[in-house]
Structure formats: structure tokens, C-alpha cells
Amino acid sequence: MLPLIDDVHARAFPAVNWALLAANVIVFLVMVGDQALAEALVASLALVPARLLSNLFNPAEYVTVFTSMFLHGGWAHLFSNMLALYIFGDNVEDLMGSRRYLVFYLVCGVAAAGAHIAFNPDSPIPTVGASGAISGVLAAYVLFFPAARVITLIPIFFLPWLVEIPALVYIGLWFLSQLANGLFTTLAGVQAMGGVAWWAHIGGFVAGLALAPFFRRRWHARRSYRDEYYPW
């Protein structure tokens, strides 16, 4: 299933969400353009659970919790993360406000990293990606907009079909798939399946569910600039 757009219109321009999108894309393009630089960035800025736990008094290791959120391992990894952030992030920022949204995004990313480390403490594998933070955004979205619908592309008999799926169903099924894969990797005694940090996704989502109500603004000032007038 490939989400394309939701039916909730943000009224305020999502400046932070677009800044996050731009930062991730720019960093990835820089990495794609220079293989040696990409390897150096992953080696120094990716989160490595075993390395962090063996260097608890080294502040540089804690920085990787944040820097790893802006690194991606390939075009598909980047595309899937940025598509989800584009579709769901603007509305969450709209209800939280830009500054609160940025803090919320980063805190969910930290929680995701913590969950990944807790379930993979001996892993020497570099972990990259914004998935954990974006999982928190998905959790906030489903709390704030349970009645929203997501236009989704689904291949049926090799033909693409556009289907409206309730956000609660779409995100709920996504979370259940992450939980199932996370439990499987844990029970099977493997650190990662297909290179995916399942517990980071789960940790970010749970953090988002717990924290989103506290980050929502008590009042919501709507502006006249509607997102259907954006130039894209």
C-alpha cells in the first residue's frame, strides 16, 4: 500500500515539516554524490548501539542519536520516509505549532533510538533514518485525526487502484506490522530483519501516542493561507 494524500487540509504553512523534508533530502543528495563522504558520514554520524553503550561518557556518541535521523540508506528508504512525513506531518504541526512540533519530532526520534538500543544492545550495525521520529508523527496524526481518510495506491491483480482508507485503519495496520516483525526478530534471536530497525519504529510510535496530547496547543489560531493554494 502506498499512501498518496490525506483529506485533512492544514491551514498554516508547515515550515518545520518542510525544513525537515529539505534537510533529509539535501543530506541524502550530498551522500549520493560522494561515496567516500557517504561512508565517512555513516561511520561517524550513524547510531551504533554497541558503540554507544561502550562509550557512555563520550558526548559525541549521544549526538549520533540526532544525526542518524537525517541519514538514509537508499532512495527507497528516503522516499518512503519523506512521503509519510509529507502526508501526515503538516497536519500534526498545524495543531502543535512549529516549535512544539520540532521538539516532539526530535523527542520521538530519541525514544525510537532508545527502544532500538534496548532490544539490540550488542548490535555493531549502524542505524540510520528518520523512521523512528516519523513513527511518532503517525501516532500523533491518528490521535488528532481519527476520522481522516488516506488516499492509497493498492496493486490489485497487477493493476493500480486508488482506495480511500480510514487513517485509523491504515496507521493501525502499519503499527501492527511493525510490532509483528519486531516480536519475530526478538523471538528468533536476530538483531534486524531486512535491515529494518523494527523496535525503533515501535518505540517512536508509542512515544508519539504518549506525548502527543501534551504537545497539542490548547488554542489553535487558524490562518487564511490554505494548503490547496500551495504551488505544488
Image: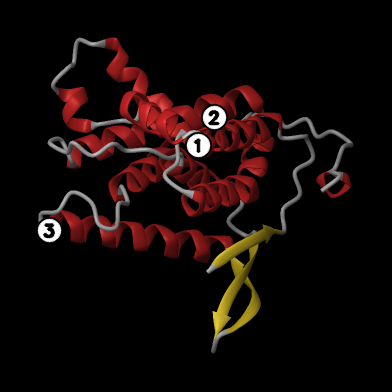
Q: Secondary structure at mark 2?
A: helix
Q: Secondary structure at mark 1?
A: helix
Give the residue at x 28% y 47%: 199
**Mark closest to the chain's N terminus, 1 or 3:** 3
Q: Amino acid at mark 2?
A: Phe
- Point out which mark residue 212 bears: 1
| Residue 58 point in image, percent of width and height | 23, 11
Q: In the drawing, does residue 75 fall left or right of residue 177?
A: right
Residue at mark 2: 215
- Assess whether mark 3 and mark 1 are in contact (beta carbons under 8 angstroms): no
The residue sitting at 41% across, 41% down in the picture is: 132
Residue 50, quarter of the rendered image: top left
- Residue 209 falls in which quadrant of the image? top left
**Residue at position x 52%, y 42% in the image:** 137
> Is residue 195 or residue 229 the one in the foreground?
195
Which of the marked residues, 2 or 3, is nearer the chain's N terminus? 3
Crowd band around label 3 with a 10 angstrom C-alpha radius: few (<14), some (14–19), many (20+): few
Q: Which residue is mark 3?
A: 187
In space, the residues marked 2 and 3 are separated at their CA atoms by 35 Å
**Extreme residue toward the bottom, this view:** 157
Q: Circle 3 — which element?
A: helix
Name the amino acid type tagged 3: Leu
Seen in the picture, residue 102 relative to 212 is either above or below; the reply is above
* Image position, residue 135 (x, y; %): 45, 45
2 or 3: mark nearer the eye: 3
| Cα–Cα span, label 1 and label 3 | 30 Å
| Total numbered labels | 3
Mark 1–mark 2 CB contact (< 8 Å): yes
Residue 35: image quadrant is top left
Side (left or right) of 60 relative to 191: right
Q: Of residues 30 and 177, which is closer to you in this image?
A: 30
